[in-house]
Amino acid sequence: MSVSLDALVRANLDDVRGRLRRAAERAGRDPGTVRLVAVSKTFGPEHVRAAAAAGQTEFGENRVQEALQKIEQTADLKIRWHLVGHLQSNKARKAAGPFGVIHSLDGLELLERLDRAAAEQGATPDVLVQVDLAREPTKFGAPPDEARRVVAAAAACRAVRLAGLMVLPPLAEDPEAARPYFARLRRLRDELVAAGTPAALLRELSMGMSHDFEVAIEEGATMVRVGTAIFGARPRPEA
């Protein structure tokens, strides 16, 4: 007997929420301090609706154009959208309004464009500074010294609201391989707070995906970005 999309997504969400809760409890944390962002990239609006029907309210997308279509198709739902993928400066205007949270702020030019666009649109998105801790040529993010400058500038913006930091560790089969990067991001946050950045502006640590979110929670994640574990294997692009 085939399982409906709604039932499959609900079961997967229940499993992920249980794993999230247990990881938080192992770390002596309140599970309510960790937000689950369901990453719906490459999946259709019917998947978003299935997750929303199961109580999911936070959704993440990688590409602005794909996200805007999905946001329009699900405009009747009471959900919040996160941009978790790289944001090009020339897409800042399109991203400033529809997204409640932008995880991939990685430079001063992008910050300036995003803040200006948000102010013009009357929007106040939360922004996270993406930090490049592994120096992988294929990944985006600001090196730690540059990230400190972006944090300082974002704290003084008129429209966007600095909310924290984000990291993408190198992909590895063993979730434990990501732990040092999660720990380093937490330490960087603590250093910035000790140096004078208000803790409220660095309250979020966005780290951890389907294969390593439990390790991320143990290291202090407040937002985990989970796609495959909720929606299944991503559709293969057509040749």
Image: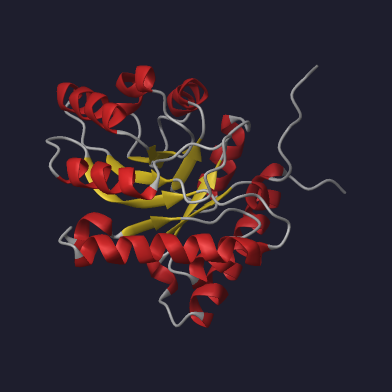
Is the residue 203 above or below the residue 87 in the image?
below
Name the one closer to the observer, 174 or 82.
Answer: 174
Q: Residue furthest right?
A: 1
Q: Is residue 2 left or right of residue 86?
A: right
Is the residue 219 above or below the residue 9 in the image?
below
The residue located at (51%, 33%) in the rendering is 62
Coordinates of residue 115 in the picture (x, y in percent): 21, 30
Q: How many marks?
A: 0
Residue 208 sits in quarter: bottom right
The residue located at (33%, 34%) in the rendering is 107
Is the residue 108 above or below the residue 1 in the image?
above
Residue 91 sits in quarter: top left
**Looking at the image, can residue 187 be seen?**
yes
Name the one closer to the observer, 91 or 177.
Answer: 177
Q: Is residue 206 left or right of residue 108?
A: right
The residue located at (35%, 22%) in the rendering is 89
The residue located at (78%, 48%) in the rendering is 3
Coordinates of residue 129 in the picture (x, y in percent): 34, 45
Image quadrant occupied by the C terminus: top right
Picture colour scheme: secondary structure
**Looking at the image, can residue 17 be seen?**
no
Name the one closer to the observer, 157 or 225.
Answer: 157
Coordinates of residue 158 in the picture (x, y in percent): 11, 35
